[in-house]
Structure formats: structure tokens, C-alpha cells
Amino acid sequence: MATRKVLMTVVGHVDHGKTSLLDNIRRTAVTAGEAGAITQAIGVSIIPIEIIKKICGNLMDVFKDKLTVPGLLAIDTPGHAAFTSLRKRGGSLADIAILIVDINEGFKPQTIESIEILKINKVPFIVAANKVDLIPGWSNDPGKGLLGNIGSLSHQIQGDFEKKMYELVGKIQEFDFESERFDRVSDYTKQVAIVPISAKTGQGIPELLMVLTGLAQKFLEKKLEIEETGNCKGTVLEVKEEKGLGTTLDLIIYNGGLKVNDTLIIGGVDEPLVVKVRALLEPAELAEMREKKSKFKNVKEVFAATGVKVSAPGLDRAIAGMPVRSCSGKVEEIELAKAEVQEEVGEVVNECDECLGIIVKADTIGGLEALRNLLQEKEIPISSASLGDVNKKDISRLESMKEKDPFKGVILGFNIKVPGEIEEQIKIKGLKVINNNVIYKTIEDYEKYTESLKKEIEIKELGKLVRPCKFAVLKGYTFRQNNPAIVGAEIEIGQIKSGDPIMTLDGRGVSSVKSMQEGTDNVSLAHQGKQVAMAMDGVTVGRQVSEGDFLYTDIPERDFKKLKELKKHLSEVEIRVLKEIAEVKRKNNPVWGVG
């Protein structure tokens, strides 16, 4: 057994400094006289422990030469989506994370998404409160270190800084994490450490690396034990077209080794891909991985933990985030690896035709898992979870689900596309697809949609009920005395519709609304403040009803109970009239409308 380097990822909102932080760590290493000591593999920067010690200087004295962690593998593939691709069986591929937050801007959509995913995957993390150099009056004397610099700030600037820090503490608390500035943390198992930094000037980076290394040493020692030799286990980070190579895979290998001519088994949606490794490629010395012109060098073999580019025939159907295994090529080994990767894929990608739940789609298996996990935490049922863009099969599943339950008849997507012809079908059929490139935003939009749908259904239901209404029979406006009686009526409170039963103030049922006319127009509904000519069957004006009378709608008991459930959609005056009607009814029947 060997101890591998700590696999670390930097997450956070776009423009809050993820790339700048890693760039600064590289620059700091060069400043420390260690040019080229931070090497790059595909998708990761390899930072040996000697470099960390050099950057941190006497801050490392606290460990008293007991460090066994061999260093860091910083995942530096650009783009937020890369983080959600990083999964392995049982959770996230990353051992530890830095959540970078602009101390001046605070939490943004992708900050929230990152902390939610870290929480669900139980990934330990520290917060880098970046851009302290932009706090007015901030100063940086490289000779003093972070805490010395903070201590020498004026009271006012320290006050401004502390206010921003505690705003962060309060925000982190909303996600059920206790947090504190790193030098004030009393228990790292219960509190998230916040390290103030400037990725631009490098201030706070030694302290950040010191805390990160300390956490890894204390809590990840067992997790870092791996088989250095033997078949590899890994994850597809990206699928890329490379000039002269065709489709290639960027892999992160977290266990074992991989050699040229090994058989590689890659998880797939329906079945695994089995390919033979033609070439293993690493960046040429000091090449920048993010530049398309990067030059590669061939290697014969790589060992965990590292990143590597794989060239092999038949990679066109490979998908980011899929699990990978290698073997020598024996049939039984291949079959075993195929079963293992597909079982892992099946934990995330599955369909259930009988299940009642929403349909979930994402572009990567890690993104799909993150979306599923967040939905499950909110107890939102899922009937299908699959990869790729919305297709015809999804639409027929969506139609069928909508018929069963309109609240579940929704496709929730993360970073997917809806082809033009499918979008047309969605519009024509009145279906719902919610898609975002921020996971929590997709869920937030779904919650808003269900709220508005619930309101729509309730208002439709309300429209079928007899609503509370009080109206006056106007004096001097009897147009016909009976058969049917037609009188002028003014709606004082609430609303009344054709067919609604009518009662007197003492609870006597007298008639129902046969029809109404406003001016020369026939209307089926009259609102508060309106004057209408109302036709009523079975009454004679001057007997059962008289001019100047006030009348109520005669609400049936079952409608009354339903109105109580839906009273948030009634106005205050309607609720008052509803109570008046209940009081009138209860004079004859004390338990009317109760229960």
C-alpha cells in the first residue's frame, strides 16, 4: 500500500478567483526558487509536500515533522461543470475542497450550488475569502504574514473586515455549517475554517495551504491509502477532440496504474465501452493545459493519483464523469470490470416506468448525481434519471407523467439542450421543461413552478365553489316581479355567479341566480362594486324578497369547508362575510361547517 497525494478541487462562483488561486500557488512556488517543481498532468497540478513546506515556511512548525501527506493534486480543469463530473462510487472524487468566495460580493448562485454539493457528498472543505486586497485601506507587508498584517490595520479597517467575515459566517450557517476564521477555530471536526486571502497578491496562501495540509493529515490519512500497482480505477474528466489524435479522454486515476496497450473499460448509458489504450499523453514541460496548442509527450505508464490523456480507437461515445477500469484484456477480467462500472452507473442512471416522479436529465453523470441528491434531500420523487439532451422518448414519458400528476409531469435538466423540433412539441403540447446550468437554480425554478401550478389549480377549484357574497336589492329597480323576478342588484362584498343559491340575512334559502345582465351584456359573474340586473326563479318581489333587502349567497356546507382550506385566495372582506354566513347557519345547526 502507498499513500497518494490529496485530490483537491477549488469550487465557487465564476470570477471569484478559482483559476487565479491555482496560478498564484504556481507563481509562489517559482518565487520560492522551485521553478518547474509544480508539474502538470492532464487536468491536475501536482504540488509535492516539499513545495508546500517551502511556501508555508515556519507555519509548518506546528506539525513537528510529522507530515506523511505526500502533497496535493489540484484539479484545475476550468469550468464549473467539471466539479460536478467528479464522482466515484460512494461520493465525490475530490478528497477535500476549497470553496472560494469573493469577500466583498459574498455568496452567489454557484457558491450556493458548490456548498450544497459539498454538503451532500460529505466533502470536507475550507473557505478561501478572496480579494481582501480590494477592501479599502487594506495593506500587505509580505514580511509580516497574514495575521500580522490584519493586526496592523487601523481599527476602522479591521472593523470593516470583521463585518465582512461575519457576514460570511452567517451565510455559511444557513447551510448548517458552523464556521470561524482559521486562527479562531476550536474544533476542525465541527467548524469550517475561513482563510482570508488575495489570489492576486498571494497574501494568505501560505496559511490556506497550511490549514489544507493539516486537515488532510488529520482526517484523510486512511482514505489516501491506495494500490499503486495493479489495474487502475478512475473517472473521465473530459472528452476532447485533439488534432491528429481524434477523440481523446482526460482521465483522473485515483487507484492503481495504467499502461499503453491495457484494455480500458468505460461506463456507458446502455453498455460499457471497451477500448485498447493506443497512447498515454502528458503535457510537455511547462505547457499550459488550457491552451489548445499544448504539446504532449508520450509516456508508457502512469500511476495513481494523477491525470492523463488517453488516445484510443472508439472513444466517440464516451461521456464525462463515467467510471473507468483497466485490465490486461482477459475475457473474464473484462466482464468483471464491465459489471463493476455499469453497476456504478446504475446507481445514478435509471428509469422506472411504474414510478410517479419527475424526469431528471444532465450532461454528465456527476451532474446527474448532484441534481438527484439535491432533489432527494428535498424529498422530491424521481421516476427517471438519464444523460444527454431531451429526446422523443422523454417527451412521451413526460406526457404520460403529466396525465398521472401535473406536479410530477416536469423534466428538470442540468446543462442539457432541447433540440428545436422537440421544443416545438413541448410548446404545442403545453409541457414543462426546466433547464439551467446551475443545479440549485433548476430546483428553485421547479419549486416556483409547483407553487404557481398549485395556485392555478386552487383558483380553478375556487371557481367551481359558491363564494361568499353579500348584495343589495336596489330600490326602484324591479324590472319584473316574478316568473322570473328581475331586480337591480349591487354587489357589496365578494362575487356571485349564475347558478349560485341565495339566502336571506336570517338564513332562509329563497332562490338562485338564473342569469345576470350588465348594461346590455349577459354576464355569468359579478364582482364587488358591480350593479347588474339579476333574474331569480321562484320568488316574487314584495313577498320572499323586497327592494332594499340585503341577501347572501347560500353556501353549501361542503363548499364552506373547501373555502376554509383555500381562504388564502379570499380577500379579508370575503373572509368576514364567510364568517357572517357561518354564524347565520349555526343558529339553526350549531355544528354546521365544523370539522
Image (spheres, helix red, strand yellow):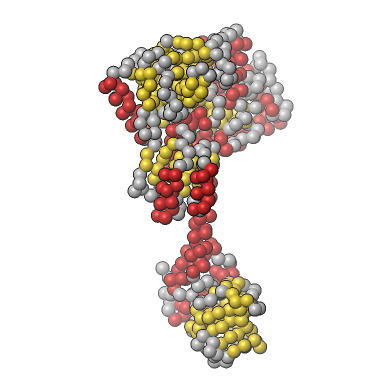
Vertical placement of residue 140 versus 411, above or below = above
The residue located at (62%, 88%) in the rendering is: 478
The residue located at (42%, 19%) in the rendering is: 312
Residue 162 seen by the camera: no
Q: Nearer the viewer, residue 456 or 8?
A: 456
Vertical placement of residue 48 versus 151, above or below = above
Q: Nearer the viewer, residue 38 or 233?
A: 233
Residue 124 screen position, x and y as percent: 47, 28
Q: State the quadrant of the C terminus.
A: bottom left
In this rendering, the count of numbered labels is: 0
The residue located at (31%, 22%) in the rendering is: 334
Q: Nearer the viewer, residue 426 or 207?
A: 426
Residue 542 seen by the camera: yes
Quadrant of the rendered structure where residue 160 is? top right
Residue 116 screen position, x and y as percent: 49, 36
Residue 307 screen position, x and y as percent: 47, 18
Residue lying at the far left in this picture: please name it: 332
The residue located at (42%, 20%) in the rendering is: 313
Q: Nearer the viewer, residue 346 or 129?
A: 346
Quadrant of the rendered structure where residue 474 is? bottom right
Q: State the quadrant of the N terminus.
A: top left
Q: On the picture, is 450 further left or further right than 28? A: left
Residue 125 screen position, x and y as percent: 50, 28
